[in-house]
Amino acid sequence: MALTAAASAATRAAAAPLAIARVDAIPVALPLKKPVVMAGERIERSQSLLVRIEAANGLVGWGEASAAPLMTGDTLPGMAAAVADHLAPLVRGQDALDRAKLAARCAGALLHNTGAKCALDMAINDLVGRHLGVSLCDLFGGALRDEVQPMFLLGNSRVEDDVAEASGKLKEGWTFFKLKIGIKAPAQEAEAALAVRRHLGEEIALCADANMGMKFAEARQFAERAREADLLFMEQPLLAEDFEGMAALARESPIPQCGDESIASIASIIALQRLGAIQGANIKTIKLGGIGVTARAMSVCAGLGLNINLACKVAESSLGASAIVQLGCVAPNLNWGLSITNHYLAEDLAVTPLRIERGRVARPRGPGLGVEVSEEQVRRFRVG
Ligand SMILES: [Mg+2]
């Protein structure tokens, strides 16, 4: 009986219009325009895993996930092995139109490894979008907006450089900035936030991200001293697992609190909200493990009254950027901004990289991710 069922499933898959014929896991290292410094991390070259899926009908879909050893625990060789050895065999020969079932199968077969699951799920959704001739926005409920205003990351070691950089970006039309904190003493960080705010004026959105680089007393001190900087939110000052500390801080802080490294699943969003530890969540496809689960997490946040901030890790190419922009266009409550990071790269993987113009980026209208990958660029930056 089991054999018959397996044989009939195989027959159906072989006859399916979108049978997955080939899955390639491709590690790449992309050069950045300049190194990005944040608490606990300095990034010179961005490491991403690409997944290329080819269907039996010749259509190709692409997905991407950034290595994030300090966020998801995913390393580049680890993600490549997770896809090649564990996840690819679960989807090869299957119908990509069964994308939700395939994502559930991958989620159930391997704990964690959200980066690998993300790259694979993104590639399957890109493939399905191309097959159906619809964008990712249309695959996930339809666009509520046609463009988003990404935030610019300020992470210089000297406040004068942050102010000068913000000044240039302000002139280019950027309207949302994120200050990397958690590196210097909290009083200095607060002074920097106040200086940047004075320079930006009152109308521009400003937030700060500590990437777990603060102790409780430091975070409280920063929040009190930076009060006048009118930060939209303060992101993940404490360690990822310190839910109680985050709740205590949220009770005392005059600045709303956003979780990032703490958010590894929809369950963690709900747990943090119930504790009163966050007023908003930083959502990344690499943390949740794909496009479908990210769309569900956005709905959960909306239902719980949480603000959301959608983000790529530093730095993902136009593939990851398109996914975040399109999810941002369907998000009901995208009121804490969005970060794409392909503009920090000296080299992109797209034939026509996603561009930010006057601080805005339009949603790609082509099928799937709407990004044409340059296979020549992929070969050039492949590292394994
Ligand atoms: Mg963050």
Image (cartoon, helix red, strand yellow):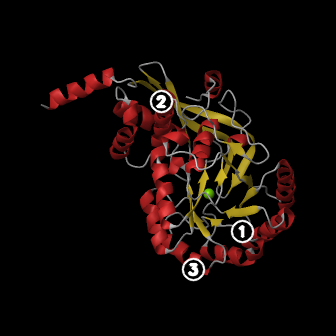
Q: Is residue 36 left or right of residue 130?
A: right
On the question of residue 264 being in view, the answer is no
Circle 2 crowding by C-alpha within 10 Å: few under 14, some 14–19, many from 20: few
> Does 127 sit above or below residue 244?
above
Q: Is mark 1 within 8 Å of ligand 1?
A: no
Q: Kindly identify the amino acid type of the residue bearing the numbered disc 2.
A: Leu
**How far apart are labels 3 and 1 at the CA level?**
17 Å
- Identify the residue under disc 2: 132
The residue pinned by badge 3 equals: 251
From this viewpoint, is residue 111 visible? yes
Q: x%, y% of residue 219?
A: 65, 73
> Residue at the spot x=34%, y=40% of the render?
101
Which disc, if any, is residue 178?
none
- Residue 119, percent from left and from top: 50, 38
Whether the residues at callouts 3 and 1 have beta carbons within 8 Å, the answer is no
Estimate how packed mark 3 is, as few (under 14), some (14 to 19) or many (20 or more) residues with alpha carbons within 10 Å.
some
Report x, y in % for residue 121: 46, 39
Is 211 or 143 nearer to us in this picture? 143
Quadrant holding the C terminus: top right
Q: What type is the residue that disc 3 sits on? A: Arg
- Pick out the residue farthest to the left: 1
Residue at image x 12%, y 31%? 1
